[in-house]
Image: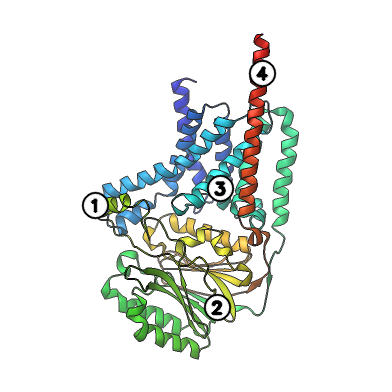
């Protein structure tokens, strides 16, 4: 391969990576993900490991370069970094996460079978999803942004989501892309792959019609409050009284709702600072109106350096939930002491929180238990499955004000919708500046507030019972099967390569 041709491959990889991100919110060009992966898998055919890595890396830089461009806003506009530092950090983030598509290409090229073996086309999807899992769950506490399944919420493949979750559904997308490459390159297997792909997509459409969970009891009237206080104004002492007054007044105007939800850290003060003068009077009012108010605020722990990002329920069924899955570089600093030294030198302001216990009692409202997640936790399917059999709906409170008017709030809502569809339960999502939304048990948006508008969403939801297959099994079975298939294909690779070498030796003799 000439240097010029290699350069063209890399440019196309960069462009295709951008195309891949256009499949996600707010662009929602769903089938661009399939087109992008088809190109990528084609480009990896017969590539050396180094070239396959570079193509995948170029793809990753294009994808994350657009897909997480909002990191600049959080660092510069609200984190206190100057323009150069914010650009540098954002660029380093893109370079780091872009490695994972490159890693997938390198592994695929290292153990790829001779192209005369048809099962080579099954190896690429398996490798792609395992590297997604590595990125999404294991590295730096996980970063599942731009995983291919999230672009399929409105496609026929959405039927698989309540069955096999994000990783299983992503595997089917990747398998489709690999099948298209096989059809183009190996005509003798064309009929087989067409049957596989048509059957797979048809089954996905059929699965969408299945009701995995059922409504129980009477509908619940809910109100979600969006105070619309931007991040640079949120914690200013002079705005504290005004903020509390708005949320209290908006709550009192909706005492006819059984459940009223405030967004993440809607109360810009520690519990110890507002408990007697604000929380307890509000708690008493909620009891008098037979309502539950879900509020969010930081709580100090018993140890001097313990601080929790927390949710409280006020009213007849009170309780506290402490965030379990913290955001790296936002709520805690990994890679210490290096990360702390660098960010302190750049004067970037970040929070330092303590993670809550993995298993906590479920909070309750209107007699029903519900799953609580705070901000970034709704990006992880497994978190929402703990005690899901006891939960009737999901509540997520978040603060996307850190990212301004960017694509991040749209992407984050897309992630949250996946949790509703996976579990077959309504999701109530309250945010500070948007996008507050009510999502039904099929992952469809029932009602949504616009960005940067003071809003109260009021509607009815159905408490749900029953479990989807994914809620019963989670991701573990899918990942175990994929790892087993990976090693089986690795063994087949060695066997095929040994046979090829033996044949060449025989021919030489």
- x 48%, y 28%: residue: 51
Using residue 53 as the reference point, say whether residue 467 is left or right of it: right
- Which of 67 and 276 lies nearest the eye of the viewer? 276
Identify the residue under disc 3: 148
Of mark 3 and mark 2, the one earlier in the sequence is 3
Question: Which disc number belongs to residue 345?
Answer: 1
At 29% from the left edge and 59% from the top edge, which residue is drawn?
A: 349
Dot 1 and dot 3 residues touching (CB under 8 Å): no
Which residue does the numbered mark 4 point to in the structure image?
502
235 relative position to 158: left or right: left
Q: Nearer the viewer, residue 64 or 225?
A: 64
Query: Earlier along the polypeptide chain: callout 4 or callout 2?
Result: 2
Can you see residue 23? no
Residue 507, compared with residue 383, is above or below; it is: above
Which badge, 1 or 3, is on the more N-terminal residue?
3
Image coordinates of residue 357 in percent, x first then y, are 48, 67
Q: Where residue 298 sits: x, y (%)? A: 38, 71
Asked if the residue under mark 2 is in contact with the one under mark 4, i.e. CB atoms within 8 Å, the reply is no
Q: Mark 1 or mark 3, which is nearer to you? A: 1
| Local secondary structure at mark 1 | helix
């Amino acid at each position: 391969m000439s240097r010029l041709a290699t350069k063209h491959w890399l440019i196309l990889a960069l462009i295709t990576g951008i195309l891949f991100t256009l499949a996600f919110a707010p662009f929602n060009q769903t089938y661009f993900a399939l087109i992008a992966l088809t190109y990528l898998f084609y480009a990896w055919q017969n590539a050396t490991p180094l070239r396959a890595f570079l193509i995948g890396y170029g793809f990753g830089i294009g994808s994350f370069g657009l897909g997480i461009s909002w990191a600049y806003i959080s660092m510069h506009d609200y984190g206190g970094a100057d323009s150069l530092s914010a650009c540098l950090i954002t660029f380093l983030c893109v370079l780091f996460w872009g490695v994972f598509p490159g890693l997938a290409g390198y592994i695929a090229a290292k153990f790829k079978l001779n192209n005369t073996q048809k099962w080579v086309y099954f190896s690429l999807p398996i490798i792609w999803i395992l590297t997604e899992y590595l990125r999404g769950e294991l590295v730096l506490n996980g970063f599942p942004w731009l995983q291919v399944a999230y672009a399929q919420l409105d496609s026929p493949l959405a039927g698989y989501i309540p069955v096999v979750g994000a990783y299983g559904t992503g595997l089917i997308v990747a398998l489709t892309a690999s099948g298209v490459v096989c059809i183009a390159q190996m005509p003798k297997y064309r009929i087989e792959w067409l049957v596989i792909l048509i059957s797979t997509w048809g089954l996905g459409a059929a699965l969408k019609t299945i009701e995995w969970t059922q409504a129980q009891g009477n509908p619940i009237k809910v109100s979600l409050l969006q105070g619309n206080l931007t991040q640079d104004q949120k914690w200013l002492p002079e705005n504290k009284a005004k903020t509390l007054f708005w949320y209290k007044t908006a709550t009192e105007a909706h005492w006819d709702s059984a459940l009223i939800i405030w967004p993440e850290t809607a109360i810009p003060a520690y519990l110890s600072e507002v408990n007697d003068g604000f929380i307890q009077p509000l708690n008493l009012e909620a009891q008098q109106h037979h309502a539950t108010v879900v509020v969010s605020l930081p709580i100090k722990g018993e140890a001097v350096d313990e601080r929790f990002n927390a949710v409280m329920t006020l009213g007849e069924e009170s309780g506290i939930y402490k965030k379990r899955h913290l955001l790296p570089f936002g709520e805690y600093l990994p890679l210490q002491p290096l990360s702390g030294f660098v960010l302190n030198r750049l004067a970037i302001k970040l929070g330092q929180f303590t993670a809550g216990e993995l298993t906590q009692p479920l909070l309750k409202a209107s007699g029903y238990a519900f799953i609580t997640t705070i901000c970034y936790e709704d990006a992880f399917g497994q978190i929402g499955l703990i005690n899901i059999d006891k939960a009737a709906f999901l509540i997520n409170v978040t603060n996307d004000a850190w990212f301004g008017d960017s694509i991040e709030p749209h992407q984050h809502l897309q992630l949250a919708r996946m949790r509703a569809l996976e579990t077959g339960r309504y999701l109530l999502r309250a945010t500070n500046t948007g996008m507050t939304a009510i999502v039904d048990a099929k992952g469809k948006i029932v009602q949504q507030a616009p960005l940067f508008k003071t809003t109260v969403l009021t509607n009815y939801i159905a408490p749900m019972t029953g479990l989807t297959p994914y809620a019963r099994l989670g991701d573990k079975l899918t990942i175990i099967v994929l790892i087993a298939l990976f090693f089986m294909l690795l063994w087949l690779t060695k066997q095929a390569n040994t046979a090829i070498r033996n044949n060449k030796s025989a021919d030489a003799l």
